[in-house]
Amino acid sequence: MPTKRTTPDFILMIVTFTLLAIGLIMVYSASAIWAEFKFHDSFFFAKRQTLFAGVGIAAMFFIMNINYWTWRTWSKTIIIVCFVLLILVLIPGIGNVRNGSRSWIGVGAFSIQPSEFMKLAMIAFLAKYLSERQKLITSFKKGLVPSLGLAFIAFAMIMLQPDLGTGTVMMGTCVVMIFIAGARISHFAFLGLLGVAGFVGLIASAPYRIKRITSFLDPWSDPLGSGFQIIQSLYAIGPGGLFGLGLGESRQKFFYLPEPQTDFIFAILSEELGFIGGSFILLLFALLLWRGIRIALGAPDLYGSFLAVGIIAMVAIQVMINVGVVTGLMPVTGITLPFLSYGGSSLTLMLMAIGVLLNISRYSRY
């Protein structure tokens, strides 16, 4: 267990707080009209997001001061708890249904999304597994299959909700971690073919997923149905131009783009702040990923390296999918934009993950 600590990565902390501050402003800007209409309080979503941010920041600073090896010690217990929560969320009366997915467990006036926390639990567990068995990772039966087995079980349980977006981020993160650990490309090619077949099966098994694919290829084939969100998102981004319409001046948030404070907040941001604003956000994410990679390379042991890689991969994959969906480059799926989109579980989870990354940076050799 590493014992020599230094100061945490200051740049990573500043980038995180900058994204968080922009996110709070944009949640209010994007949600004020909807909040006034639904709850007669234009600050409804902004106030809740601020509360989530406060809880997340407290958790981040707390975790930043906990030796990251603690997650290695407790990884089995944490992942078992997350599996129990994934089971509970599927039970009617315990799990709450939103937008067709039974993904939330109510806690008083708030709710948690167990699948979000499973992502971080899987990273911590897989980092431990890979650091202890890295020499076996080149073996298909002894290395690759066991390391992916538990992730597939978690993915299957998440798909029972169903939540394809969160499951995809989790599986993509696991694949990146295993690839970095030294798995053979030929093995990934074989599993990739199976994955494509399974993905096609998942799409074919649910008509709404087929509609999402067809709307992605040609949203104008069903402009008032499956293609509606993509079209409205592009209507937001296009008029934004280079400098945007101005903060708070979005037109698409006036009941055109459904719940713009969540998955499509980047569209509202691009409409109000333009290409410059959108590019600045992507630059901040690139800076965050660079600092994370630097921390992973400088970690004092394999566990720290794999843990950092997993966290960075999770953030990168989530950003790529969200921005890809909003800009019409990928089919629509429910993925939040880290630190910017409205959502308590997602925001808290991301800030906790940054806390782990900051703690690893305190032992980094760079």
Image (tube, rainbow, N blue to C red):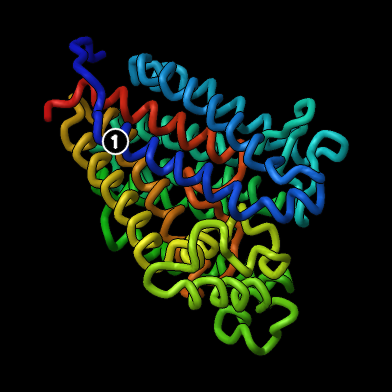
Q: Residue at x 42, y 65 (%)?
A: 192
**Would you say 230 lies left or right of 108 here?**
left
Q: Residue at x 30, y 55 (%)?
A: 283
How many badges with numbers are in the image?
1
**Would you say 182 lies left or right of 121 here?**
left
Among all residues in the image, which is located at the extreme top? 3
How dense is the environment of label 1, judged by Cα within 10 Å: few (below 14), some, or many (20 and up)? many
Q: Is residue 156 above or below residue 108?
A: below
Q: Residue at x 68, y 31 (%)?
A: 85
**Residue 267, position in %: x, y?**
52, 65
**Residue 67, position in %: x, y?**
33, 15
**Would you say 295 lies left or right of 56 here?**
left
**Would you say 357 lies left or right of 11 here?**
right
Q: Is residue 23 above or below residue 47?
A: below
Q: Is residue 36 visible?
A: yes
Q: Quadrant of the N terminus?
A: top left
Q: Nearer the viewer, residue 80 or 315?
A: 315
**Residue 71, position in %: x, y?**
41, 21
Among all residues in the image, which is located at the extreme left? 366
Q: Nearer the viewer, residue 156 or 47?
A: 47
Q: Amino acid at mark 1?
A: Leu
Q: Is residue 329 above or below residue 272?
A: below
Q: Is residue 321 above or below residue 22?
A: below
Q: Which residue is mark 1?
A: 12
Q: Is residue 195 visible?
A: no
Q: Quadrant of the C terminus?
A: top left
Q: Quadrant of residue 365?
A: top left
Label 1, secondary structure: give it: helix
